[in-house]
Image (cartoon, rainbow, N blue to C red):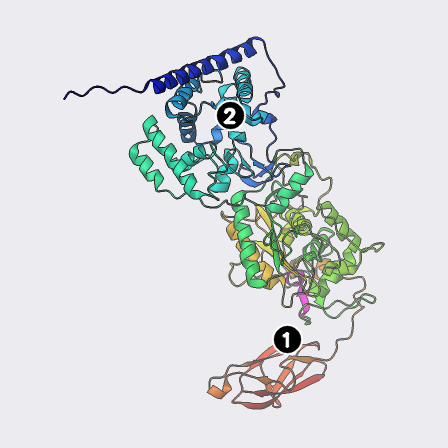
Amino acid sequence: MTDVPRTAPRGRRWRVAFFGLWSVLTVASLAGLALVATVQNVRSDLPAIPVAEDIVSSPVVVDRNGFLLRPFTIEDGRWRLPVAIEDVDPLYFEMLLAFEDQHFETHNGVDWLAVARAAGQFVRNGGIVSGASTLTMQVARLIDGRDTRTIEGKLRQIVFAQRIDAALSKDEILELYLLLAPYGGNLEGIRAATLSYFGKEPARLTPAEAALLVALTQSPEARRPDRDPDSAEIARNRVLDRMVASGVLTADEADAAKTERVPRERLDFPIIAAHLAEAARLGDPAAEVHRLTIDRERQVALEQLSTDRAETLGEEISIAILVVDHQTGEVIASVGSSGLLDEDREGFLDMTRAVRSPGSTLKPLIYGLAFELGLAMPESLIEDRPTAFGGYAPVNFDGFYRGTVTIREALQQSLNVPAVIVLDEVGPALLVSRLARAGAEPELPDLTAPGLAIGLGGVGVTLEDLVATYASVANLGRPVRLIDGLDDDAGAYRAPLPVLDPPAAWHVADILAGVPPPATASLGRIAYKTGTSYGYRDAWSIGFDGRHTIGVWVGRPDGAPVPGLTGIGMAAPILFEAFDRIGGRTVPLPPPPAGTLIADTNELPEPLRRFRHAEADVVIADPAPEIAYPLDGVRVDLGLMSGEGTPIVIKVRNGTPPFTFLANGLPIGNSAFAREETWTPDGPGFVSLAVIDGEGRSDRVTVFLE
């Protein structure tokens, strides 16, 4: 039996014909309406046509090389970061145009062929198979913000798209799309999307990443990777398949891209140099881009150093670090705290600008002024003995006195009494005025004139103040204006007067270069000084080589004491590690300037061999010697019970050398002018230790050695 060809039912043929005719008429009607609207210049209430520069975007703070440090949201809480075409991987554009708008370069804002194709597919399949919106139409919708799901809304979109195409270049349209396209939540624009989903800029994208970005803008909420990664992956893979069909990718490339994991959470936007970035934004709220002198790589390294070291010191300890190029004044890194969001450390406080007591860190400037005024030289002798200045009687940090020392030794050992003796001659007011020349703003109690206590920390300064002061010393006395913005005109700043004359500044640097470094660092690499404020509240270390000055502060932001907190013990190791982390070789300190006098004590002119203080006769009679260690009545474990004991160290404070040390009535040792002696006992048991000073005064303790 012969098969008879079957034909479609008459009713279905009529429906197909009807919908086909309807599609054609719809396309023709839309085209006609759009044409009429264009010819008649129907303006409706369409918004003005912007360029990318007219769109409000997130303020961003960038480093000296243009790398992003910190973005901020726009007023309504959206992230919309500025981006240019050259900042985006070309692969993304290939995929975008192949998937969304193949005739973008040739149509006038509306692809009528795509409209006809979409209508025909709708008729044949009874539903939407592909859209007809061009990238220009999408930009029109994003700018206008109106509903385009109605005939009126679609017509409005078409008219606006044609006007946009007539007014802007294709690149300008693409830049608007890159800035406004939605990617889910409060993310707008490709740069916000790549930073949030991939943690990187859009300049380099994998095929999988580019495909996901193309897929997300079609349905940004339904396909958000952080909410429905499965839907995002399906949509991404569909784009990859289309790229194979379009010839953008090979099948192997697409298959490899499909194995790449879709991100399942949003990443935090970078917050680098947080305090400085916030200050820049507040300083110029209208600016969209703030360019800092910060070097992002060095900044990140020092922020990590601050965080790591603070974790080992205690939950409430914070560390601030400031790095300056003292040849230009540019701030290379500024770490305000050990973690912006760490509430225990009060990380929101910028401790580079907090006013604190500087401890001993002003001593180099005190001696520098004495050198400049011709009162002393590094090898001049000075007395380190108990001395009173009216009702003020400074003591050394360790409670001991060294007798006659050179100025060099006094500064390198950070002795308090010699520093105050010199300051009394130089004058506290001069010290304060030279700090001001350096750009510092020292704070004194209201209605109080500068006093001798400022030499040992009795004044309020910031880490910025100290770094600026030391930078001027490193710069042979010339003031260094600290600048943190690339738009700042450093060349316009000309300080009329130096902080120190060049020879005096060089002598200070030379002395500080000989300060013994921490155990883990090498000698002579940098010139540096430490300081500890009263009550162990602040630990400081400031140092420099021939190019960079770095300051470190350690302490609690609330000003509470930290037992054992010292500059040499906690801040100095961080300072030396900071120099390691900024990279590059240490730059040598400058040679002595012309006219610098370099001489030993006996080679100095007679008036400079010994520092002469106008009131040098005001000296307190030395108190009797005291054995500071071991204390009377204690037990000292020397390991004698095991038969392998170690010597005991006997330390004395006060008194007048030479000293005679005795154990059980017998003299021990031969260092008559030293304030400590060692002795090895024969075995465990009680022992009587005594010391007699040069004036016959004595002290005695009895201890049990085991």
Residue extending farthest to the top is: 39
Residue under the image location 29 percent in, 33 percent down: 251
Residue under the image location 54 percent in, 54 percent down: 305
Q: Earlier in the sequence, mark 2 or mark 1?
A: 2
Residue 12 horizontal/vertical position (percent):
35, 20
Front in this rendered view, residue 501 or 452 = 452
Q: Residues within 10 Å of mark 1 (few under 14, many from 20)?
A: some
Q: How many marks can you see? A: 2
Task: Indicate the quadrant where residue 288 lies.
Answer: top right
Type of residue at label 2? Gln
Q: Is residue 290 above or below residue 173?
A: below
- Secondary structure under badge 1? loop
Label 2, label 1: how many angstroms apart (C-alpha)? Answer: 89 Å
Whether residue 591 is visible: no
Disc sitting over residue 138 in the figure: 2
Front in this rendered view, residue 537 or 649 = 537
Q: Are marks 2 and 1 in contact (CB under 8 Å)?
A: no
Nearer mark to the viewer, of 2 and 1: 2
Front in this rendered view, residue 441 or 96 = 96
Disc sitting over residue 429 in the figure: none
Name the residue tied to disc 1.
673
- Secondary structure under badge 2? helix
Type of residue at label 1? Phe
Q: Which residues are magenta?
A: 402-412
Task: Indicate the quadrant where residue 533 lies.
Answer: bottom right
Residue 241 horizontal/vertical position (percent):
34, 32
